[in-house]
Image (tube, rainbow, N blue to C red):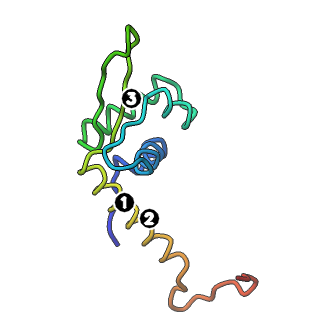
Amino acid sequence: MNAPDEVIHQSTRLRIMSSLSAMPHAEKMEFTQLRALLQATQGNLGAHLATLEEAGYIAIEKDYVGKKPRTRISMTAAGRRAFNAHLGYLREVVHALASPIEGTAMPRNRRR
């Protein structure tokens, strides 16, 4: 089984990467939109974004709209690869849990 990506595996960072992966390629999400979506505080979100940026998984762009500062975030190609690899790891975990282990019985009350 593959190992988890420890940078992405943390729950808030996983939610950030999931949100960004839903964006069309090369699209950017505004910090305020991401903060509202995740219901995170500004400081907490900023710290997790810094970790993801340091890993090269996201790009942060700061500019101004009129006189107001704007921060936009996008997933990098490396981030998309890492996120997809981490999803593969999670699928392996789910598959392993769904498959009966040799010598054990799965509960019979499961209905599909």
Q: Secondary structure at mark 1?
A: helix
Q: Residue at x 45, y 23 (%)?
A: 43
- Residue 90 numbered tag: 2
The residue labelled by disc 1 is: 86
Q: Residue at x 76, y 83 (%)?
A: 109
**Residue 109 in the figure: left or right of residue 31:** right
Report which quarter residue 62 is drawn in: top left
Amino acid at dot 3? Ala
**Disc 2 vs disc 3: Cβ atoms closer than 8 Å?**
no
Q: Position of residue 92 (x, y in %)?
A: 42, 72
Report which quarter residue 103 is drawn in: bottom right
Compute the Cα span from label 2 to label 3.
24 Å
Compute the Cα span from label 1 to label 2.
6 Å
Mark 3 or mark 2, which is nearer the start of the sequence? 3
- Residue 47 numbered tag: 3
**Residue 101 in the figure: left or right of residue 48:** right
Compute the Cα span from label 1 to label 3.
21 Å
Residue 78, above or below 107:
above
**Residue 53 in the figure: left or right of residue 21:** left
Mark 3 or mark 1, which is nearer the start of the sequence? 3
Query: How many residues crowd mark 2 within 10 Å: few (<14), some (14–19), many (20+)?
Result: some
Task: Looking at this view, name the residue that lies furthest to the front.
Answer: 66
Query: How many residues crowd mark 3 within 10 Å: few (<14), some (14–19), many (20+)?
Result: few
- Residue 17 numbered tag: none
Report which quarter residue 20 is drawn in: top left
